[in-house]
Image: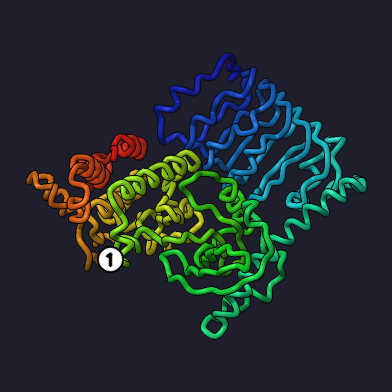
Amino acid sequence: MGLSGPINVDPLLNIPSLRSVSFISNNFSGPIPPFNKLGALKALYIARNQFSGPIPPDFFSSLASLKKVWISDNKFSGTIPNSLTTLRFLTELHLENNQFSGPIPEFKQDIKSIDMSNNILQGQIPATMQHFDVKSFSNNKALCGKPLPKECEAPSNNSQGSGWGMKVVILVVLAVLVAVIFLLVKSKRRRDDDFSVMSREQPEEVVQVHVPSSNHSRGGSEGGKVLGNGGLGSAYKAAMANGLSVVVKRMREMNKVSRDIFDAEMRRFGRLRNPNILTPLAYHYRREEKLFVTEYMPKGSLLYVLHGDRGSSHAELNWPIRLNIVKGIARGLGFIYTEFSSEELPHGNLKSSNVLLGENYEAFLGDFAFHPLINPNYAVQTMFAYKTPDYVTYQRVSQKTDVYCLGIIILEIITGKFPSQYHSNGKGGTDVVQWVFSAISERREAECIDPELKTNHSNSINQMLQLLQVGAACTESNPDQRLNMKEAIRRIEEVQV
């Protein structure tokens, strides 16, 4: 239409259902507008304009749902934004006829349509992209490698030496992980034929994500045991000779995910850094099942400490510890809701069995952000989000569903009761939501506080009641009347010991 001038993105924020934006074939110029404010966007079309300048490397980081990116036929310069490689659902990428320079980052998504022709890109085309047509990379004089006919020059001796050093580090890490897998195969061979098959696969199938430097010691294994069967998979503990204990979790209901998507997603998980979330140390891909290796948490789950041992462990959960656990959960959720802000369920399986406790009872969130990876039918059967009123009553889930799950944990921690909501049939345990709401309406909410807390911390009853009110506000049956996650976290932080 020949439109020009600035594009004001802010008014578009008032259209929450907006999924596709197209400004193709106009006369807009200047730097790329801040379309990354539109976190739920699935398609961005701004081809055939006069946009120019570099695109910030992290520009697409907040657009996790983006599938189609057409920014061709402009004057963009600088390197291709690396954040494009983190878009797990990306299927169409058109960057042709610009002035992009530098190397092509490694894309591992299941991209169907790609074009980077007529730029000034250089270096070797990544191996994951060599199956595309030669036209996708034509007229980049400094590009080399398949599918182009131009071969790349052999690396110098110095770069070979550096590469060999990195290979040694990776091989050491792989050796440790293979030892873990071998241990589990050995201990489970008679009872689990599927798992023993894993030991016969090539070690190249195991891919490093991240291992802290303190864990880079000699591999070897001393013992292992089955920790139990959770909703999303079975977990096994293995102790290494260097003293490091890890948990290996088997996930069998992710076979809808391609290897490239799974690899990209696991590497994304491996880059996450927050003191209240549990990130993978390594992973293993197989079509029938996936393995996640995480650090072992010595205290176990919050569920076990609260209900599995009513002796010493439960007695240690005084008011300051319980409040710090709730705040740790809230801070972990705040981080997850930033990193996965566009997801329908940034966590999706929040319950006390998925809150792990460190040596000093610090809280770590596990099993988060798996919702897009799990087979849909299995997700409905196993993920706690689908046992809430949001799905049972309204047949939908949203970010407010995670808030409800947070509220259940808060009420569980304050009352010390096992929530009946954790049972799929609703039988057993205590309906903590109904109990607390009835008590609040009758102004006898103090009766809901765990007697051990009231006895040992009588001076903090008001703070406990304040947190109880937050839990109640999080578990309103109607999502529209429920707190959002940001407000819930703010109110939790206001509670003092």
> 357 or 400, which is in the foreground?
357
- Residue 46 placement (x, y as % from top left): 61, 28
> 384 or 89, which is in the foreground?
384
Which residue is pictured at 62% across the width and 38% down the height?
83
The furthest residue to the left: 442
- Residue 431 placement (x, y as % from top left): 20, 58
Which residue is pictured at 64% across the width and 50% down the height?
109
Mark 1 residue type: Arg
* Relative horizontal placement of residue 134, taking residue 440 as reference (left or right): right
The furthest residue to the bottom: 190
Kindly state the secondary structure of the residue where label 1 is placed. loop
Quarter residue 468 falls in:
top left
Would you say residue 205 is visible in this rendering? no
The furthest residue to the top: 5
- Residue 395 placement (x, y as % from top left): 31, 53
Would you say residue 56 is visible in this rendering? yes
Q: Which residue is mark 1?
A: 310
Which residue is pictured at 73% across the width and 34% down the height?
96
* Relative horizontal placement of residue 262, taking residue 77 as reference (left or right): left
- Residue 159 placement (x, y as % from top left): 87, 46
